[in-house]
Amino acid sequence: MIGAVEVTPAWYLVLGAALFSIGTFGLLIRRNPLVMFMCIELMLNAVTLTFVTFSRMVRDTGGLSIVVFVLVVAAAEVVVGLAIIVALLRKRPGATADDVAILEG
Amino acid sequence: MLDAVWLIPALPLAGFVILLVAGKRLGEPAAGWLATVMCAGSFAASVVVYVGLLGEDEEGRQFTQTLFEWVPAGGLRVDIGFLADPLSITMALFVTGVSALIHMYAIGYMHGDADFSKFFVYMNLFVFSMLMLVLGSNLLVTFLGWEGVGACSYWLISFWFSSEANATAGKKAFITNRVGDWGFLLAMLLAFATVGTLNYEGLFASVPTIAPVTATAIGLLLFLGAVGKSAQIPLYIWLPDAMAGPTPVSALIHAATMVTAGVFLMTRVNPILGAGYDWVPDVIAWVGVITAFVAATIAIAQNDIKKVLAYSTVSQLGYMFLAVGVGAYVAAIFHMIAHAFFKALLFLGAGSVIHGMDGEQDMRRMGGLRKFMPLTAVTFMVGWLAIAGVPPFAGFWSKDDILLFAWGSGGADGKVLWAIGLVTALLTGYYMSRQVFMVFFGEPRWRDAEAAGVGEAEPALVGSGGASGGAITPGAAGDAGEATVATHPGTAVGSHGPTSEHAEPHESPWIMTTPLVVLSILSIVGGVINLPFNERVDFLEDFLHPVLGVNEAEIAVSTTAKVALAAVAIGAGLVGIALASVVYLRRRVRAAEPKVLAHAWYYDEEVTAFMGGPGRKSFDAIAWFDAHIIDGAVNGVATVVRGLGGRLRPVQSGFVRSYALGVTVGVVAVLGYFITRVSF
Amino acid sequence: MIELIVFAVAGAACLAGAIGVVASSNPVHAALSLVGTLFGIAVLFVAQEANFLAAVQVIVYAGAIVVLFLFVIMLLGVDRTDNLRVEPLGGGQRVTAAVVALGVLGLVLATLASTDWEATGVVGEFDETVPDINQLGEALFTRYLYAFEITSILLVVAVVGAVLLARRVRREEEIVDPGQAERQAEITERIARAEARAAHTDGARDGAAADDAEAEPATEPAPAQEVGS
C-alpha cells in the first residue's frame, strides 16, 4: 500500500529545489516588478524549507536560526523594495522591468 | 719603423678632414697641394715600413698593429688593426705612389673648376679608404675600406652631377658594386659562423680545420665581391659608364687602385681558396679569361678615348684573375703593379689629350696630335708599348708570366686558357695601336670637323657602348662647344677660350706632364721587380713568398718552352700592332668595327630590358604581395575585430532581464561544473 | 502514512501556488497564489516539527508581507493585467529561462543523488524532548546574539528607508544645496558683466560708425578686429 512509502527528508529537499527553480523561472519571465518580487519571495521560501529540513537531518538548531534571520531580512527587504517600487511607479505608472533599458546601460 | 704603419692611412685621413673643414678657404691650388703632400707623406711612411719589413727575416715579416677595439659584441671581437706584411706593403707602396702623382696631375686638370677643393676632399678620402682596405688586419676593416672606396667612387664619378647622365653613371657603379658587396657580407657572416673570427691570422690558422664546403663557399662569395669591385663578367657594366667622371678619377680609381681591390682580396685570402674544392680556382680563371677576351673585343670598336681604356682595364683585370685562378698569385700582383703604372699613364695621357683638345673625346675627331702635344704623345706611346707586351717594357714581363703559368697549369684546360689569353694579347695590341694611330697619327681630322661646320648630325650613341654614353661622347648635340658643357659643366677645360671654335691643341702644363713622365719611366723599368731569369732577380716573388708561399703554383716548364712561349706572346702583340697599322695608319684595309661590338654585345641593353620587363614585374609582384597580403593581414585583423565587436554589441541591450538571464546561466554553469567535479 | 498525506497535500499546495505566481497575469491573483504557497510551507514546517517557525511564517510572511504586497498593488493600481503572450525580449528568453530553471533543479537532484539521498555531516546535539522553540530561543540569544541585534538595527534602517523613499514630496520642499545660492549669484553676476562689456563695445562701435558715416571701408575691419581679438 501507499503507506509503505516513507517520506524521507530528501523529498522535502526535492520540493524545495522545485520551488526554487519555479521561482527562478518566474523571475526571468515576468515583467511586472511586483510579480518579480513575489518570485523572489518564492525562492526565499524554498530556501527556508531546505534549511529546516537540513536542520532536522543534521540535528542542529543552526538551521532554524538561519530561517528566523531569513524571515526578518526578507521582511525588511520587501519593505524597502516596495517603497522603491512605489516611488518609481508614482512617477511612471505602468513601468515594467524592461523600461530600465531607457537608461541605456 | 714598423710602428709607422698607422701613419699610412692617417695622413690621407687628416687631409680629408682638413679639406672638409677648410678646403674652400684654402682654395686653388693650395687644397690640391695639401692633398698631394698627404699622399706623398703616406708613400714615405709606406717606404719606412717597407724598409722595416726588409729588416726582418722572412718568417718575421708580419706586423700587426691594433689601434683599438672596434666591435666588442659577444663572440665577435673586431679591432681596427693594420697588418703590415709583404702583400699589404706592396699594395700600399704603389697605391700611395700612384695616388700622389695623380693628385698632382689633378691640380692642373681641375684648374678653374668651381668645386676644386671638394674634388680633393673626395680623393683623399678615397686614398684613406683604399689604404684601410689594403692594410686591414681583418675582413671587417677590409670591408670598411671596400665600402669606402665604393662610396668615393660614386661621389667622384658623379662629380659633375648637374648632368643627369653623370649622376646615373655614379648610381650604376654603386648599385652594381652592391651586388658584389652582398657576396662579401655573406662571406664574412659565414666565416664568423664557422670559424668564429674575422681576423686574417685567426682565419688562416684555422684553415686546416675548415670543411672544404665552407672554404669553397667563403671563397666563392668573396670572389663575387671581387667580381663586382673589379668589373668582371657579369658585373663589369659600371666601369665603362664610370668614365663620366673626371679623368684623374678614372686614372686613380678605375685603373690603378679600386678595381684592383678584388684581385688583392683574392690574393689575401689565398689560403681559403686553397682549402676549397679544386674547381674553385678554375672558375676564377675562366671568368677572368673570358672577361679579358670579351672586353678586348669590345674595345676594338669604341670611339671614345676613355671608353677604350675602360674596356682595356676590364680586360687586363681579367688577366689578373686568370693569374689568380691558375695559382700564379705573384704574377697577378706583378701585373697589377705594372698595370697601375701604364694604365694610369694612359689615362692621364688621355686626359691630357682631352684637356688639350678643349674637351673633345671622340677619337674620330682627333688625329696627328703628336706634333702639337709631343710630350703627351711620347709618354702615351710608352704606355701603349707597355700594355701591348713589348719587351723590355713592364707589361711584357707580367703578362708573359701569366701566360706561362696558364700554359703550365695542368691539362688541356691550361692550354685553352693560354690560347684565349694569347688571342686577347693580340687584340690588346690591336685596339691600343688603333687608339694611338687614330689620336696621334694621321691627318688632323679635327681641323676638317671644324671647317665642315659643327652641326654634325651623326648619331652619337654608336660607339659608346650603352645608352648612358650620351654625356661622354660629345656630338650628341653635334656641337663641340655644347659637348664641352656636357662633359665638363665646370670650367676645367672650358677655360681655354670661346667654346664654339677650337684653339689649336696645345701641350698641357708642367704640372700635368710631370706625372706622365714619371709614370712612363716606371712603365719602362718596372719589369725589374720580378724578372724571370733566375732566382736572384725575382724580388717580388721572394718578397711575397711568406704570404703566398704554399699556394703559389709550381710549374714544370722547361726553359726552352719558356722562351718559346715568350716569343709567341711577343709575336701576338706585334701582329696586333701590325694589323692596326695596316687598317688605321696606312688605310689599306677598311676598318671592321661591327655594331655589335660597338654596343658591347648589347649586354647593357639586355640588363636594362630584363630589369624593365621581368625585373619590374617581379618588383611589382612583391609590392603587390606586401600591400595586399601583409597589409591585408594586418588590416584584416582590425576588420575582424571590428566585425566581432559589432556582433557582440547587441548583447548589451539595456534589458535587465536579459542580464539577469545571463547571470543565472553563468551561475548554473559554474555550479554545475563544481558539483560534478566534487560529487562524481 | 499521515506524513505522506500531509506532505502530498502541502506539497501540491506549494507547487500550485508557485505556478500560480508565475503564470497569473493579474498581480492580485499572483499574490493570492503566493499565500497558498506560504501556507503550504508552513504546514511542511509543522511536519518537520518546527512549530514556532510555522507560526512565524504565517504571521510574518502570509500576514504581513503579502498584505503589504496587496496594499501596494491596490494603492498604485497595478492590477492591470500583464500581457503574458508577448515576450519583448524574444523567444530565446523564455526557452533559456526554462533551461536554466531545469538546470538548477537538475543540479540539486544530481547532488542529492550522489549522496544517495542521505545527509552526512555534523550530528549536532538535538534534544528531542525539549520543544523546538526553547532550543531556538537558546540558540538565538546565546550563540547568534550578535546577528540578532544587528537584524534589529536592520529593521529600523529598513523602516526609515521605506518612509523616506515612499513619501510624497511637496514641490516647495525641494532639497536645497546650501552653497547653491552663492554659486547661482556668482554665475548671474558674470553673465551680467559680460553683457555689459559687449554692450560697451557695441556702443563704441555704433558711436564710431555714427560719427563717420562716410568712413572709408578701411576702418570697418579695424573695429571688427578689435572685437575679434
Image (cartoon, rainbow, N blue to C red):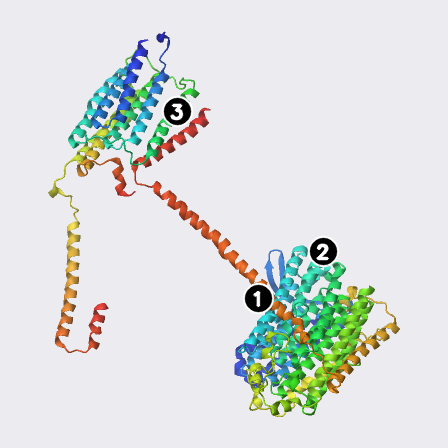
Could you say which disc has been placed on residue A34 in the image?
none
Q: Quadrant of the N terminus of chain B?
A: bottom right
Q: Residue furthest left?
A: C172
From the viewer's perspective, is the residue at label 1 or at label 3 nearer? 1
Measure the alpha-carbon separation of dots 1 and 3. Answer: 76 Å
Q: Is residue A44 visible?
A: yes
Picture quarter containing residue B311?
bottom right
| Residue nearest the viewer, comparing B165 with C90 | C90
Residue at the spot of label 1 = B612
Residue A46: quarter of image: top left
- For label 2, count other residues whose C-alpha is less than 10 Å away and answer few (under 14), some (14-19) or many (20+): few
Measured as percent of width and height from the top left, residue C24 is found at 25, 26
B383, above or below C182, in the image: below
Amino acid type for the residue under numbered disc 1: Gly
**Left or right: where B390 falls relative to C189:** right
Q: CA distance from mark 1 to mark 2?
A: 36 Å
Other-residue count near label 1 (Cα within 10 Å), few / some / many at <14 / 14–19 / ≥20: few
Residues marked 1 and 3 touching at CB (< 8 Å): no
What's under tag 3, amino acid-wise? Gly
Looking at the rendered image, the disc whose residue lies closer to the viewer, 1 or 2, is 1
Relative placement, left or right, of B15 versus B536 is: left
Q: Residue under circle 3? A: C106
Which amino acid, by three-letter code, is at mark 2?
Val
Q: What residue sits right under mark 2 in the picture?
A: B213
- Write the residue at 67% across / 71% down: B601
